[in-house]
Image (cartoon, grey):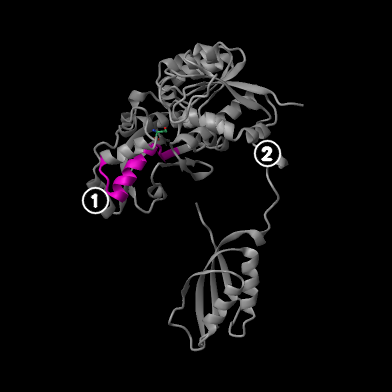
Amino acid sequence: MSEPTLKIGLAGFGNVGAGVFKNLEKNRHLLRERTGCVLEIKRIAVRDPSRERSFPLPPGLVTTELSDLVDDPEISIIVELIGGTDRAFDLVKASLESGKAVVTGNKALLAERGHELFAIAEANGRPIHYEAAVAGGIPIIKAVQESLIGNHIQSVVGIINGTCNYILTRMSEAGLSYSDALGEAQQLGYAEADPALDVNGWDAAHKAIILASLSYGRWVPCEKIHVEGIESVRTEDITFAAKLGYAIKLLGVIQLHDESGSIEVRVQPSLIPANHILASVKGVYNAIMVRGDIVGNTLFYGSGAGQDPTSSSVIADIADAAMWTQPTRGAGLATHSLYGETLPISESVSKYYLRVEAEDRPGVLARIATVLGEFGIGILSVIQPEDHDEKYAAIVLMLHYAPYGIVSDALAAISNLDCVRSRPVLLRVEDLK
Ligand code: HSE
């Protein structure tokens, strides 16, 4: 049986839109295996096709009319990535009303008019998916919506603007001025088209409103929340804070006050203890701590902005919409034909830490090194502490990349040397990328 083809209308071909097109193509086979559908972008609507772009517009798909997407009966999923709140509202509304599922990454739209749009979605029995609207590539929406469904959410505290976190990190670590760091973030494609929204805190505030609505089932009006940006933070504040044992982060805080039942939502640059896990979130990374009454604290970490991470979330939503439109295989299972055999541990390569307890006499280190050399294993460094008992010394060697099978054989040979006291200790050094 051949898979159904689902046709998608993509509105907007900026940084994220181009990423969605590129990565849907890149992982086309994987997505077909996992969703049981062929996902095909049928049309792309852009305001100005002649604009110069880093990723060229695919010929033959382009229109300047959003109605060409909405009015096409073959298109069942509309992906809204045009930004703004007026045309985007009209597009999402018209799409839902014409029976299409909607995917959007537009946090301002949802924060300001989500209450209207979700009512329209409900009235029309069509879904709105919005994973990309909060924290770029981090799957926080599904985590709160699905995985934490059994919890009262007590608080959500997050670094939810990648641009601000990038700026604060560069000011702190490279001593850059605020404006130079902002320039870098813009060049890297992290900032919104209007970067004022990032640095004045409103991009984070829109995300906080969405997280509050997910956590507490109500739309907090924009005017009821306190929002401060990072424009007034200077490099010297970061230096003073560090001296006092703190890091400065732009935090979004959503908190339930049990006694009153009120919900606190705010965004502010804040000092947090330098040894807190959120203080180690650097650069464009975001992290969100969600505290549930059953689960306790959970932490979600990843790239909060950028073309590929954000398109990963949009694609997840497209897959969800596809499986909703056309219940097929069910989410997430890959067929066995996709990947290869299990790698035997003997072929797994890494660096190693090796501690050998050996007699303290001339020539011992050379004998150990000779065995390693015979097996073709390089030595990165050696330590032999001077303070040891009279007869035996610990020799610690950091070994270069080698397959575990070869290192195990070398270890057996070293264990058999008459100058070695007990079985050496071998630990892997993991490259945590
Ligand atoms: N400009 C946003 C940020 C992109 O810096 O986090 C994702 O919303």
Percent coordinates x, y for residue 409 in the rendering: 65, 71
Q: Examine the rendered structure and indicate whether residue 323 appears above or below residue 426.
A: above
Judge by depth and name the residue closer to the eye, 396 or 422.
396
Mark 1: secondary structure: helix
Quadrant into which the N terminus falls: top right
Question: What residue did someone put label 1 on?
Answer: 240
**Which badge, 1 or 2, comes first in the chain's sequence?**
1
The answer to whether the residue labelled 1 contacts the one labelled 2, judged by CB atoms less than 8 Å apart, is no
User: As shown in the figure, which amino acid type bears the numbered disc 1?
Assistant: Phe
Q: Examine the rendered structure and indicate whether residue 23 appears above or below residue 47.
A: below
Residue 252 visible in rendering: no
Magenta-highlighted residues: 155-178
Mark 2: secondary structure: loop
Picture quadrant where residue 85 is located: top left
Percent coordinates x, y for residue 267 in the rendering: 34, 35
User: Residue 267 shows which numbered tag?
Assistant: none
User: Residue 334 shows which numbered tag?
Assistant: 2
Left or right of 274, for residue 73: right
Percent coordinates x, y for residue 191 in the rendering: 37, 33
Q: Is residue 161 magenta?
A: yes
Left or right of 108, for residue 406: right
Q: Is residue 277 magenta?
A: no
Q: Examine the rendered structure and indicate whether residue 405 appears above or below residue 28.
A: below
Q: Residue at x 59, y 14 (%)?
A: 99
User: As shown in the figure, which amino acid type bears the numbered disc 2?
Assistant: Ala
Mark 1 Cα shell of 10 Å, populated few (<14), some (14-19), many (≥20): few
Residue 126 visible in rendering: yes
